[in-house]
Every structure is written in C-alpha cells, then in structure tokens.
Image: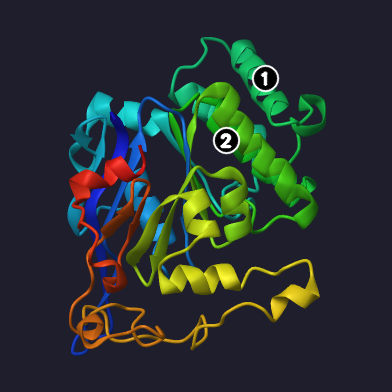
Amino acid sequence: MTALLEARNVSKIFTGGGFRNRKQVIALENASLTIDGERPSITAIAGESGSGKTTLARLMLGIATPTTGHVIYNGKPVDTMNGDSWRVFRREVQAIFQDPFDVYNPFYKVEHTLLLSAQKFHLAKTRGERYALIEDALRTVGLRPEETIGRFPHQLSGGQRQRIMVARACLLRPKLIVADEPVSMVDASLRATILEDLLKLNQELGISLIYITHDLTTAYQISNSIVMLYQGATVEMGDVELVIKKPEHPYTQLLVSSIPLPDPKLRGQRSRLQGTLDETTGLIGQGCRFSARCPHAMDRCRQAAPPLYRTSERRAVACYLYDSAPEISSEEVAKVFA
C-alpha cells in the first residue's frame, strides 16, 4: 500500500490559562491514519464533540503543526514543505469546512472564491476560460451557473453555499478532500444531496475523502473505513462494516447503541453502558480515558493507556479486553486500511 497522506503518532497539545496557572490540554494523542494513494477511499473520523476530530483534520491539512509526530504527504513531512512542494500539497489536498457562510467574504459575490482558486493555481489563461471551468464545477455538484453566479452569499441557502464549497474543491481536481462536518449546518433535506455530491467525487473523479462527523449513520452510509476518537485518543479503527455492526470497544458500543431505531419496540432491547456522553473521565495521561465509564474497567486500565490491538485483519481496538491479539505500531496502521 502506497500512502498518499498519513499521520504518524501525531499529538497536539494546547496551553492556556494565566501566567501563574498555565494548563496543558492534550487535544489529540498519538493518532495514526493512512490514506491509500492507489485506491480512492472514504475514511470517516467519528466521535462526540471534543474528541479531537477537527484537530486531526487541521493537522492533516497542514493548517496546524503537530506537537509531536509527523504528517507526511507523498513521503514528505508537511511541516517542512515550502515553495513548489507546498503549492502542490495545497492544490492536491483540499478542505470543506463546517460552516457554509463563514468561509465567504460577504462583500464579494460567491464566484469570487472560485475565481481566486482558478487564478492562484493557474487553471486557465483567460477570464473566459476560468468562468467555463467554474460553470462545469457548479454543474458537477448540481447547481445551475445562471442561478448561482452573480449572487452574494446571503442570497443563497446554506445548502447552496456548501455545494459551492464542494464545487471549489472539485475545481482543483485534488487527490484528497478533508470534509469537516460538511452537512451538520444544512437542512436535513439537503444533507443527502451533499453526501451524494461527495460520493460522486469519490466514485467518478477518483478523489479520496476524509469525512469528519459525529453522525455514525452518515459515516456508515458513505465511508469504507472509520476511526473512532474519544477525548483525543483513538479507541477503534478499521472497516466500517465491522466497527459499526459489531463494535468491540465499549465506547463504540455506547455510540452505536445511541443511534435511534425506527421501531420503538426494539429500543428497550439495547444494552446500556454506565455514564453519559458528556461525563468527564479521568485526568489526561492517566490510563484509558474511558475507564471511568467502562463497565469492564480494570486496575490496569487506570494505570496505563492500552495500545492498539489488531483483533482482525481489518480492525484494531485500544482496549485491554483484547490483549491476546497482537499490538500494532503506527507503521502497521496502514495494513488496517488496506
């Protein structure tokens, strides 16, 4: 497996508080992820708010620098890139952010951001050619150029603004798109449409996706693989069918059990774990972060965080319940996504 983009044991520590009361918060700890460079894929990064999803996305986009570890693109560390290599990375790895309004300058018409991308990356020589590319990109995501071009952001719906962001990413023909909660702030009726647009980019244009979400239902619908995060730590990763249908980590089991069922008669049959999703666990760095809520917690869980155990060919779990399985290193994580 040739890696397009990979994170190797990346951690991100933020420091806050006053001069005498400085605190360190580990937003992400020893996370590893590999995106295949040969086979277009969709990898979901899932977890509740505060789990480190967006932090991981920002590191892989090169927007933030890891405190420890490395993000590597085509064999080169992203934090050491400059000049032409950085320019190539910025074109080939694109982002779609959560809020479809904040990314626009309200004083410019919506095509302004598309024109900037076309100019910066020299996609066409003339203004007419740039507009032709923009119109094609808009049609790709189901928008009519004649109803979109010339309007200001406030004159379009949230769904339309978000689809323009998908069109902007599509315009550059990237190899990878990092989509951070791309449907969380649009109407439910438009979510399926935007997800279909993302699937189209993957299946028809061969673009890989990292899909950041707290919604396991949409993660299951569109992704091939999934990484589950809890308070900055990776708890489970692997094939989405295995992780969602037969979750092994207690936290993943809790999240899956919270998905609403269509039949009310079936809801009472689910097993429930102690604690609630907004409950705070033990101090960071002291054992498994889920131990305070886990019904299977042992003394060793509170003393040291468990490594990732490869419980099957397409899955790894960070839980001592599976310590009979072999441990995997950050270099071996790619095999889980193969």
Residue 334 picture quarter: top left
Three-letter code for the amino acid on which mark 1 is drawn? Asp
Report crowding for label 1: few under 14, some 14 to 19, many 20 or more residues within 10 A (C-alpha).
Answer: some
Q: Which residue is mark 1?
A: 136
Mark positioned earlier in the residue sequence (2 or 1) = 2
| Mark 1 secondary-structure assignment | helix
Residue 186 picture quarter: bottom right
Which of 308 and 107 lies nearest the eye of the viewer? 308
Residue 9 in the image: x percent, y percent? 21, 54
Which of 283 and 224 lies nearest the eye of the viewer? 224
- Residue 233 can be seen, yes or no: yes
Report crowding for label 2: few under 14, some 14 to 19, many 20 or more residues within 10 A (C-alpha).
Answer: some
Which of 84 and 209 lies nearest the eye of the viewer? 209
State the quadrant of the N terminus: top left
Q: Is residue 289 left or right of residue 188?
A: left
As displayed, is residue 289 above or below residue 198? below
Given this view, does label 2 or label 1 mark the residue nearer the observer? 1
Q: Which residue is pictured at 26% across the width and 60% down the height?
A: 308
Residue 145 in the image: x percent, y percent? 76, 26
Residue 228 in the image: x percent, y percent? 42, 61
State the quadrant of the C terminus: top left
Q: Is residue 277 left or right of residue 53?
A: right
| Mark 2 secondary-structure assignment | helix
Residue 113: image tag? 2
* Gap in angstroms between the C-alphas marked 2 and 1: 15 Å
Residue 158: image tag? none
Residue 323 in the image: x percent, y percent? 23, 67
- Residue 114 can be seen, yes or no: no
Q: Is residue 273 left or right of residue 301?
A: right
